[in-house]
Amino acid sequence: MPPKKPRVIVAGQIPPPVGGQNIMIQKAVTQFAQSDRCESAHLPFFFTPDVKSFRRSSLSKVLELIKVIGRLFRIRMTGPIDILLYPTGGPQKVPMIRDMFLLPAVLLLSRRVILHFHAAGIADRLKKNPGSALNRVVSYLYGKAFAAVVMTNFNRRDPEAVGINRILVVPHRIDDDFDPALVCRDDRSALRLLYMGHLCADKGTPELLQAFALVRRDHPELELDLVGECMPPFTQLILEQLIEKLQIRRHVRLLGVLTGRAKAETFGRADLFIFPTVAPYESFGLVLVEAMAWKLPILATRWRGNLDVLTPRAGAVCFTISPSLAENMRVALEQAIRQRSDWAEWGRTNRLIFEQRYRENETREWLAESVLSLVTTDV
């Protein structure tokens, strides 16, 4: 009689809204469903219907918490849960409270819980306020997990901070959407900078606009494309007012959330990708990987796992951060422009890194294979 296959439950929210964590949870659900090494099911979350509700408390989230626990019990009634892959909420208060109330049921009803630290920053929060009751409870619950998955070596610090010893470092992989026919970077009358992601202070949006306005005085060919939507408390009105104040309205395009061909065309038009994040929850800049896939040179903060994602070989200018983030970015952007003749070579190097590290492999089960390697089939 063949050994019993483990039953794996993947918990978490899939798009919408569109974001790195939700996209990767969707990939995890698909990978385990396709794997012939396990049986699987999805425990869906619907805590965040849109970006405006990120990290905000509401009655609807309390009701959803109850519903998730109910879904979990129904899944358990259909058979044992050998592995439950659980996405941690991050270092903000609301997602930590979610984990505090949800994890006891998850730990009780699952033989092995593997935490997936999509959102980083728990180690920093625990260090900053070790006496907090919420911090102590969540740390205790996280420490009961069987193992953890992180995306960079830098982020090992989060599971290590709560006492987890089994840690897998599994970088995200994505589909290769690069289309040479869409690359159009020969316009010498314009130098197009691209940012893609949430628009907010944590992602460095205000400072990016300030640095762009300063550098453009000496480089009038600069144009800036912003792709994404505003994350509260940063709003579209604040964004528009800042652009007006800096007098760069004619040179900044607000493109909103893009997908499919429109997103690909935007990557193809860009000359330099900028990722000025200072987010405390930053774990793996998926947009950095997308930019590398599109042969783009990169300007990024030396922040959390960014250097791990890029690797020391990347064609990039990485700058340290300080309270003068806009000034740091201005200096780095001017340095990158001085090295413009190297951008094509930087882009080729970044494309090679993407192909070697981040392009979806033939089995397309890179996460499932790693997680299942932790356990035997007789769980």
Image (tube, rainbow, N blue to C red):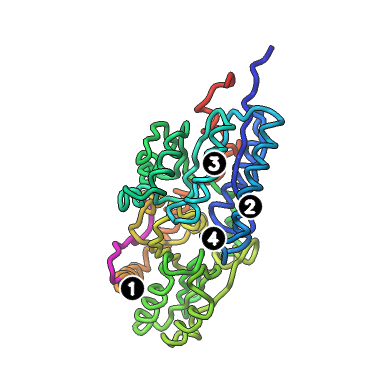
Q: Position of residue 93 (x, y in %)?
A: 45, 56
Indicate the quadrant containing the C terminus: top left, top right, bottom left or bottom right.
top right
Q: Tell me the CA gap for discs 1 and 4.
A: 32 Å
Q: Tell me the CA gap for discs 4 and 3.
A: 20 Å
Can you name the residue that lies furthest to the top here?
1
Q: Amino acid at mark 3?
A: Tyr
Between residues 285 and 65, which one lies in front from this camera angle? 65
| Mark sitting earlier along the chain (2/4) | 4
- Give the residue pinned by disc 4: 57
Q: Amino acid at mark 4?
A: Ser
Between residues 159 and 211, which one lies in front from this camera angle? 159
- Give the residue pinned by disc 2: 64
Q: Amino acid at mark 2?
A: Glu
Indicate the quadrant containing the N terminus: top left, top right, bottom left or bottom right.
top right
Q: Position of residue 243 (x, y in %)?
A: 46, 82
| Mark sitting earlier along the chain (2/3) | 2
Regarding residue 34, the answer to whether it shows in the image is no
Instruction: Specify start and end residues of the magenta stretch as a single range.
Output: 313-324
Q: Is residue 290 left or right of residue 346?
A: right
Q: Secondary structure at mark 4?
A: loop
Residue 48 vertical placement versus 339 (above, below):
above
Q: Residues within 10 Å of mark 2 (few under 14, many from 20)?
A: some
Q: Position of residue 197 (x, y in %)?
A: 51, 64
The mark lying in front, picked from 1 and 2, is 2
The mark lying in front, picked from 3 and 1, is 3
- Give the residue pinned by disc 3: 86
Q: Quadrant of residue 92?
A: bottom left
